[in-house]
Amino acid sequence: MTLNEIIETTMKEAIIFILSHLRYEFKEADTHNSVIFYGEINNDLIEAIAHYLVGIRACAIDAALNIRADLIGDTDEDKIELYADICSIVGENNNALTMDQIQDERNPWLSEGIFHLFMNISTRLTNIHPPGLIIALDLPHVSAKDKGLDLMALYLFGDNLGISIIETKAYKDDPNKAINKAVNYFKEIEQGKHAPRIRQSIQTMRTSLPPSFQKLVSSSLWKKNRSYIPNPHYDASVPMNWSNRRPSLNDLSVGKTRIIIMPHIINNFDTFFNSISENMRDFARGL
Amino acid sequence: MFDEYVKNLINLLPDLPKLDHNTCRRALSKAYFYIISSSINVDQDNMIYQELEEIKSTLRSMVDALESVAVFDRLNGLNISPEVENACAFVAGESLSLLTKLPHSSEELLLIHDPLFIETNYIVIESALLYMIGDYDINAVSVVKHLSIPSIDIEDRSITGALRANSTYLLKRLVALCSGDVREVEGSVPFTGTKKVPTRYEYLIYEIRIRFYEKIANAVDFYIKWLGGVDERGIGKAIQYLQRARDATRASGYEADTIFADIYHLCSLLLVVIDRTSVRSVVHRVPQPTIGDEAILKSFPIYLKERARGNKDSVGRPFLWPSALEFVVDCLPGPNKDVVISMPTGSGKSFIAELSIAHALSRGWVLYLAPTNALAHQIRRDLKKALRAFKDVDILTFVGGEEYTTLSEEQIEQNGKHYVAVMTPEKCSLAMRLYKDYFTTCVLCIFDECHLLNDHRRGTTADIIIAQLITYSPNIRFVLMSAMISNSNDLSEWLRVAHDGQCVPKPLKWRPSRTIRGFIFLNKEDYNVEFQKAKDSLIALPARRVNINFDIPLALIVGLSGPWTLDGPPDYCVTSLPLEYTAKASRNRDGSVNSKFEGWKNTSSRILSELFARTGLPVINFILTSRHHAFSCANKVQGEFPGCIGEEGSFPPIVDAWLSIADAELGVNTLLRELLRRGIAVHTSSMLQPEQAASEWMFSNGKALLMFATGTLAQGLNLPAIAVVIAGTSMGDPRDTDSIDGVSRVNAMILNGFGRAGRPGFSNQGIAVLVSDKPYAAPISEQLNPTGVLAKFGVLAEPDATVEVHSPIEKFIDNIITDQLDTQTATIPELALTSLLAEIDEESGNILGRTLAAYHKRHLFTPHIKDQIQIQISTIKETFLKQPDVPHWMNKAAMKAGVDLFRAWRIWSAYEQRGLVSIEGGVSYSVIDWLDVFFQVMSLLPPKRVLPYLADDGTKTQTILKSLRDRVVMQREVDDIPWDMPEDWLILWQELKRLVLLYMQGESYAVIAQNYLGVSIEQINNKRSKGDNHIPTVFGFLRKIVEQLAIDAGCFLAIQELAVYGEENTSLIPEQLQSLPLCIKNGCNSIEVLSWYRFAFRQRICAHNLEKAFPVPKNLASDADRANWVRNMRLIWLFSDYDIKENPLLNYARIIILNGGYF
């Protein structure tokens, strides 16, 4: 098997595994809806997630190399050392990164990757994305330091297209801060900031849609069919009731049914991210 | 805010739920009104702010959805018509550009090593490109104008440094494209990618970006080269590069990968830009002329390339605007048909004229009719610059106007050369009377501001000229142009019928800017409260106190759909203004109190204009009532405006030069200098041309943000502002008003003013506010119904072009057909026309039959009637000539001089009485000797013929004109020679001559005023606010007396020519006599001074100084010799080290000639 085939197979296996182990719960509140992810973390699950994350990174690198080759008309198969790249995100070992790097770069990237996984799964587990069926999903950021949209997805509901904008935050002890930051970000979007990025991304993503969906795009843009998905990752020790009203969400124009908080509640937050990192290194080293 | 063209565009928008066309228009207008309101500091609590977020949200949705339709739907397989795409692109571009001006949260500098990636930068480029797709490339220019681009550091060779450099380079090239700047640049994209793949994924992405930017920048450069005519295959390469780059973004293998979404987006936009703008490429779309002079045909492609590229000093014109494109497609090569173009101000008329000229030149010469001499000279300068690729083509203008002269250099050339002759209709009429054969080779007539046909005074001349050109010029084509005519179809049908059946109307509605129309009013509730308070206070005061002031807040209502509609409050926005008008509560004799609003229109329009200017918006305050009010309003402005040079600053050299020449001409410091220092410009007919030029320069270049102007500004000059305020809804006393020739309705004047708002290349939108003659009061309310305003001021609902052109000859035709033409009651133009028609005898019926007037009377104009007219004109002539003492050449003299028969006859009688100057006697006469003779003749004229000179001069002192009038007040109908003249009549005429002589000797206006008004030189001041101030009095004297004397001097010349020399001896007429009319009109006392004036620099005071510094040899044999001598000496003066310390005025003249486009 080629490297790409190995990665593809492993990702598929990871998704199937995670599908069978993912636990979530849907809750309604006055100001929003919630889909809460939780569950027993075990080594197999961590390994599956790590494989997916390495896979998605490998996909991104492969995609970039393909673009470069196409651009320069070169058919040489250039490579980037995947292991080194994974280490550039998660460090060569769990002690290699400073606390700041862990908090500001590693964990956010891993959180984005994990949520990419959840959104990816949503095509088969439709309930976890209540606004509609996801039909196109962006790749995560190159680096967690990158500003701008964390993740974007196009979804279908009835005869309409919608856009989900996902803002991921990993604050171990402070999910409220994560929500507040995400809400501020969504407000910025409503004030027109990031509009060019959203326009650019939608027009790029629509190229992957079948012809029958194309006529829906422009009118959906006019109608502002948009959902906001704040996605806090935090430690299970922090008590949170996601059914409570969150007044700050009232400031967003899209309405309750299109604000879906998707918390990822993690038992042993640090251990979880360290384990994922460890597993990613192991998997990348073995490729 | 929208003209008909844009309304049609908006009507083409696709059906989107809840996006009806009204919503779209109103959102755009409200956004602009918000921007204006916020810039003039309207109170933030005002009602217009309440909707702001909603408006912004609507605009954003319009951008997202309409850009998607305009650019991406087709790309993804949907079938969208190009018209719909254009409409969507324009509205998306407009929405986006307005959004960029609305307040938003500060931008985080994302990826500062990549300036193109910064959202605010990208949005600017995006909106500019959308404008270009929507056919509004000129709007793209103003959008990118203020984009700040960092410098490129090619020393930083790190990957982020290389990314920054390439991104900056691409940004620069995009700005060049959006600015229409297709001049070649030195250098190339700074960096290519690395040979090896970077080891880090993040750097790999950077490296790919570096490559993308390189590819796109190269594509832009290829397209720019193609547009400039440098690389014929450039467009193909550009498309190939962009498609390749765009395809590469989709080559990742991961379908929804958006990492290079910006590249995909930009490439897609650029590909559509190329698709749409390439069809409007000047170099590639304008066809080559097909027949004619080889050298000109060869030069044509060079001309197109030069025009597209521009030069080192200015950007060229690579794209045809939609109006020009339509003309090119329908009328070129050729022009192959006549065309009547009705298009808004600033939408590219001049370029259409230029393209027509460039095409026609290969076949012969071109006549360009301009409404004023000043404009003719401006057109000459512009054409000279534009047509310089045609090496042997001259652009001619003439000093003379309607006054008769036979100087050879005032004649149209007939040497087989190809040239453009720019002149007024009056000058053309003279040339046609004298040298009609020259017109057989005229192949094109451009008639700029052709609504002049409608003028009761000048329309006769204009209508006859066109009819004569149709008759005398077998290969001629006509391009008639105006921004104001509403009946272009009618005019077109006239030309089709009268000429050769090939004429199309072109009512081109495209306009490069949008204007919001507003109306200023008093807040009624506040008025009631404040008036009551003032009234109570006044009643409480002693009865001797008559007035008490009180302040009333002002408010503004604007229509959101262009011309105002009857769609009610939703189509309007109302806001209070941070302005108050001070009214008076005034006690009447019976003790009652009422309110008074003195100077309402000028005061409120001034304070509103000041408000605009103080916040940085260039504004023109049009004064309709009196040319002198422009200065009086300017004088009332306190303080200075942003961008002005201030008390300590220096004027730019060219402005300083203009003002210094004005100082010398006036003999007192021009008042304008102090005003311009504070950023206030003035533009009226009661100003010197150097003063007007200084005002124009300062306003155009942002050094004066506030201009007070009269109708002179509307006469062809294109000096658009962002804001326009019209003071008043009626015209003033015609003697004091600067109106637009051919425009009699005040509404047309107002609409012309409205059309000046918006400044293509600087601002894509503008605001025009009307101030009524008397205040209008209404409560400030969101629900204010504008019906009341509209009922009183219907002009707010009128479209821009409303002048229905009719020729004044219509009445003449009625009279002649009904046999009622009475030479005793006919108007002067009618009499002059009769003389002309009588002289062209056998063609008179034909020519009259080809006039616009005849077209409008076509139901009467049968072939039989043509014959009848011919007979009747001949009869009038014969009857006239049969009278005792009327020489046989009398009609010819009148015709040549363009004066009425009776006037010419009386001048002849007076000359006979004085005694003729023989051929021998006149040989040694100087210009001044001839002036003596001429004044002796004039002094013998009977009162009826001199009364036009003696109309009220508006002064309070006893002037020479008043004295002359007083002497003959009881004899005003006397028309005999000799007549019983008052004792001191001849002395008074000598006095008048002395004044005229002062002017001709180059004395300043102050000296003339001193002598005219009988005051000492120390008493002369530089005030300009009233017609009877010293300096304005001289302007009036020159306009009413000197210009008329020059015409009569022309008649005197024609009489001398025919009576003394005979037509066979015209070569013997002394040039001193030939130059008399021009010397009088232009203030020259010798043929030598006049030569400097005509051939070196058309400023009276400078011509006198030049003659002092470089005396023209007296022994030069002819006008042509003097022209050559002066032109050669001018070069020496301009470019040698000639010491002019003795005469600083000449240094100023030199600065203007070399830097003002006069060389």
Image: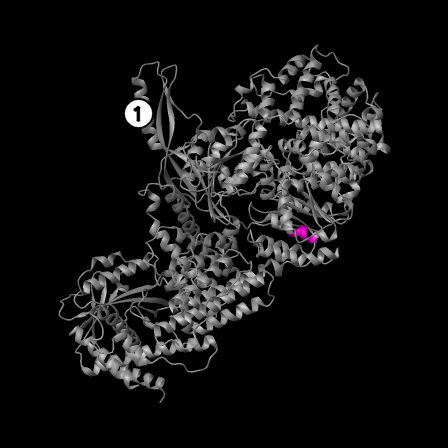
Instruction: Give the vertical position of B681 relative to B419 (above or below).
Output: above
| Residue B361 image position (x, y, % from top left) | 71, 51
In depth, the one of B831 and A192 nearer the eye is: A192
| Residue A19 visible (yes or no) | no
Check disc 1 and report the residue beneath it: B533
Q: Chain of mark 1?
A: B
* Residue type beneath disc 1: Lys
Residue range in magenta is B355-359
| Residue A23 image position (x, y, % from top left) | 20, 76
Classed neighbour count for the residue bearing mark 1: other residues with Cα under 10 Å, few (<14), some (14–19), many (≥20) = some
In depth, the one of B117 and B462 nearer the eye is: B117
In depth, the one of A95 and B805 nearer the eye is: A95
| Residue B408 image position (x, y, % from top left) | 76, 37
- Where residue A145 sits, quadrant-wise, is bottom left
User: What secondary structure is the stretch in magenta mostly built from?
Assistant: helix
Residue at horizontal 35 percent and vertical 57 percent from the top: A192
Q: Residue furthest right?
A: B1064
Please tell me whether mark 1 sits on a helix, a strand or a loop: helix
In the picture, the quarter occupied by the C terminus of chain B is: top right
- Where residue B710 sits, quadrant-wise, is top right
Question: Is residue B1004 found inside the magenta-colored segment of the image?
Answer: no
Question: Is residue B356 found inside the magenta-colored segment of the image?
Answer: yes
Instruction: Give the vertical position of A27 relative to B839 (above or below).
Output: below
| Residue B540 image position (x, y, % from top left) | 29, 18
